[in-house]
Amino acid sequence: MTLVQTPFGPIRGLDRDATQVFKGIRFATSQRFAEPQLVTGWDGEYDATAYQAQCHQTPGMMEQMLGEGSLVMSEDCLFLNVYTPACDNNRRPVLVWIHGGAFVNGSGSTPWYDGSALAQRSDVVVVTINYRLGAFGYLGDLNLGTHDQIVALQWVQQAIASFGGDADNVTIFGESAGGSAVVSLLAAPSAGGLFHRAWAMSPSIAQLRNAQRGAEAEAQFLATAGVSSRIEAAALSPEAMLTAQQELLKDVGAGFSGFSPTSNTDLIPTSIRSAASANPTPFVLGTTRDEMQMFTTFNPEHSKIDEAGLKSLFAHRFGDETPAALAAYREHRPKASNALLASAMLTDEVFRVPAWRLAEARHATGTATWMYWFTWASTAFGGALGSCHALDIPFAFHNLHRKGVNAFTGDSDDRTAIADSYADAITAFAREGSASWPAYTLDNRTTLKFDATSAVVHDPEQSLRSLWAAR
């Protein structure tokens, strides 16, 4: 056990080998559909030796694989966890992790997000946070989940020095919805000054929406829940909230933006993409090569796509350019089946194209931006996953030893070297405020490719990027 004095009061945590761990620290309180309130303190010692509740959710395949199924669920879920080499005065870089899960799933207490290995390896302080999800966090224009993230960063500003961290050197990083949360925080004026660098892994930028779409999604939710107003929804049981939420999510198109950060609101007054493009905070973003294979590999309907179905799928995006588009994808994926070609195109549409466009927009405003591409492929399931969505998470945290990781990544010998280079790139950026490879420009589109042998490349798969440029 270890005891640390903080501005909020004493906190008791755990000694774990070369790190000290503080679990389940309350950073805020909240009521349903109300903004969070930063804690002011507590009586006596705060027991931070066990993880606390996550937001109500319906865990999916990804959450179960990551080991989240056993966590207690509650609307009282605004907790964070701190992993540090020592509670001293060394003023280490601080990395604040924002979890993914499509803004409807996840928790900062997921075992794969344990920051002990990263803290020990790189002499940094790692913080992982919860925030409200789904209808609890993103109903209509409320942006409560983003409010929660901002208040967590306020807590970090006030308390992290007690854990050996430097409040003047905070990096936010996250994957998938967590990566898009990073982008939305770049666009939120009230988050200004609370962090100093940003790193987005496979951000689901297409989920980010405007107030009109937020109002539409709220109306859909209320109708599904059988209530006529937000006031009536406030009286629903958590189970009824989740039931209505799941019904909305069944519509894949509408559900994708059913609950997510919303622009043209009090918290984010302008376009998220334009505001994030103009924010001068040093920013790294990237994707994996085969993002969508996480979602399509085990979908029996997707595996049945024939030549006619593939052409129809491409024609919906490329119209008269479909023959050229198919030829370009076949050139870059010469051994791919119809299903894999479809996944490659969807990967670009959902993840790579929005990332390219954000990097291009930031270049146009002169803000410091770096891009990477994670292309190492999992050997699990006979290699069927490729370099899929979320594959890079255990590498970012250097958590290859965690339960279940081998089943996702395989156990090839080159994994450790990739974890070394990927985790070191993230922590070096946090320490220096500049990536170790050249910034992204329209002249050369420099990109760091993470693989068994990592290398700086220029405009990777240029013909595919050009296909999407006018779309």
Image: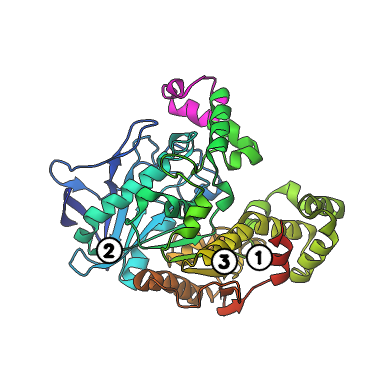
Q: Count residues near mark 3 (Cα–Cα under 10 Å), then give few for <14, some for 14-19, many for 20+.
A: some
Q: Residue at label 1?
A: 383
| Residue 453 badge | none
Q: Quadrant of the image for the C terminus?
A: bottom right
Query: In terms of sequence position, does the residue under pointer 3 or pointer 1 come before the other?
Result: 1
Q: Which residue is located at x 38 percent, y 35 percent?
A: 74
Q: Residue at label 3?
A: 410
* Magenta stretch: includes residue 229: yes
Residue 260, relative to residue 181: is it above or below? above
Query: In terms of sequence position, does the residue under pointer 2 or pointer 1 come before the other?
Result: 2
Q: Which residues are magenta?
A: 224-244
Mark 2 and mark 1 residues within 8 Å of each other at the beta carbon: no
Tag 2: amino acid: Asp
Q: Is residue 55 left or right of residue 347?
A: left
Residue 435's quadrant in the figure? bottom left
Q: CA distance from mark 2 to mark 1?
A: 43 Å
